[in-house]
Image: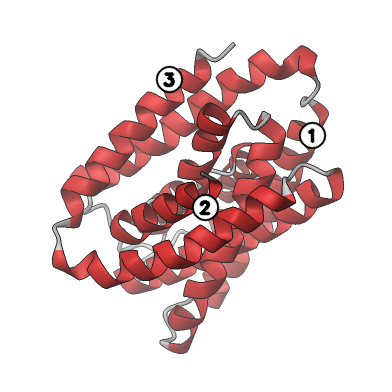
């Protein structure tokens, strides 16, 4: 089951571009019964491994703006540290119901942000307001550390609205930003024991085959309807997660 889930998640990511963390965390909690903190830690590690495969391609094509990436990480890294530590502090059973509500709301918010991008994609800015990026990247980092979701959807919106980067640079820079946050968050959760090593291995095995499958068929089908369907599914999963008891 774990291998099949990893395969399905990787295929969905390859076909739609929706972030691994947004998809993985609710599925682990709702379908496999993984505790919230362990699900987030495992999802972050899985997401980091998925991003490691993609980042070199953007780096070689020089589609990563290092100055903007540095500004994002300047705010995002402290944020992800705070979010991960807060989740670890609240993982006791006494706070579990509250964690389900917060995680559900964050998943819903991330999915709605992606839906906004699907239907209102032209929000590029001609002005360079990148000096403000650390302040907005900090809460994004906190969300990633706390829920494993948010870097892809919110990071892209931030870059489109505050920098004059090209579309390719937005994707490449945001992917590196997400990798940095996932990597730092993974280390915190690893140190706190908030992960399932066997589950992560099975997800990665399925994910490797899923990534290849998704890449092979991505150009042959219309991705927009699939992306909308997956994001609507995430809204439903987020609602279920918020009502979980």
Q: Residue at x 51, y 74 (%)?
A: 53
Gap between marks 2 and 1, in whole Å?
Answer: 27 Å
Q: Nearer the viewer, mark 2 or mark 1?
A: 2
Q: Position of residue 76 (x, y in %)?
A: 64, 53
Q: Of the numbered discs in the image, which one, if any, rests on residue 50?
A: none
Numbered marks: total: 3
- Mark 1 in CB contact with mark 3 (< 8 angstroms): no
- For residue 88, the mark is 1
Real-space CA distance between mark 2 and mark 3, rounded to the nearest whole angstrom: 25 Å
Location of residue 26 with respect to 50 vertically, above or below: above
| Quadrant of the snapshot with the C terminus | top right
Instruction: Residue under label 2, please give it.
Output: 3
Tell which circle, 1 or 3, labels the residue nearer the N-terminal end.
1
Residue 49 spot, x, y in % from top left: 59, 64
Residue that label 3 marks: 239
Q: Residue at x 30, y 41 (%)?
A: 230
Q: Work out whether residue 230 can be spotted.
A: yes
Of labels 2 and 1, earlier in sequence is 2
Q: Residues within 10 Å of mark 3 (few under 14, many from 20)?
A: some
Residue 159, placed above or below residue 106: below
Q: Is residue 75 visible?
A: no
């Amino acid at each position: 089951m774990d291998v099949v889930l990893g395969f399905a998640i990787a295929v969905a990511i390859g076909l739609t571009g929706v972030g691994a963390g947004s998809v993985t965390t609710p599925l682990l909690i709702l379908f496999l019964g993984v505790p919230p903190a362990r699900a987030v830690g495992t999802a972050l590690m899985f997401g980091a491994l998925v991003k490691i495969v993609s980042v070199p391609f953007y780096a070689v094509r020089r589609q990563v703006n290092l100055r903007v990436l540095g500004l994002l990480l300047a705010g995002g890294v402290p944020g992800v540290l705070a979010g991960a530590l807060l989740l670890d502090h609240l993982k006791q059973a006494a706070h579990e119901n509250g964690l389900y509500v917060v995680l559900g709301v964050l998943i819903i918010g991330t999915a709605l942000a992606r839906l906004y991008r699907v239907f209102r994609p032209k929000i590029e800015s001609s002005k360079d307001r990148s000096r403000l990026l650390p302040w907005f990247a900090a809460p994004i980092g906190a969300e990633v550390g706390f829920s494993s979701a948010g870097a892809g959807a919110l990071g892209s919106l931030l870059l489109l609205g505050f920098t004059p980067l090209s579309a390719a640079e937005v994707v490449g820079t945001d992917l590196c930003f997400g990798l940095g946050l996932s990597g730092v968050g993974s280390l915190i959760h690893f140190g706190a024991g908030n992960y399932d090593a066997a589950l992560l291995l099975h997800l990665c095995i399925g994910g490797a085959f899923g990534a290849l499958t998704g890449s092979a068929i991505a150009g042959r089908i219309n991705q927009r309807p699939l992306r909308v369907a997956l994001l609507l599914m995430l809204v439903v999963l987020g609602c279920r997660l918020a009502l979980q008891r």
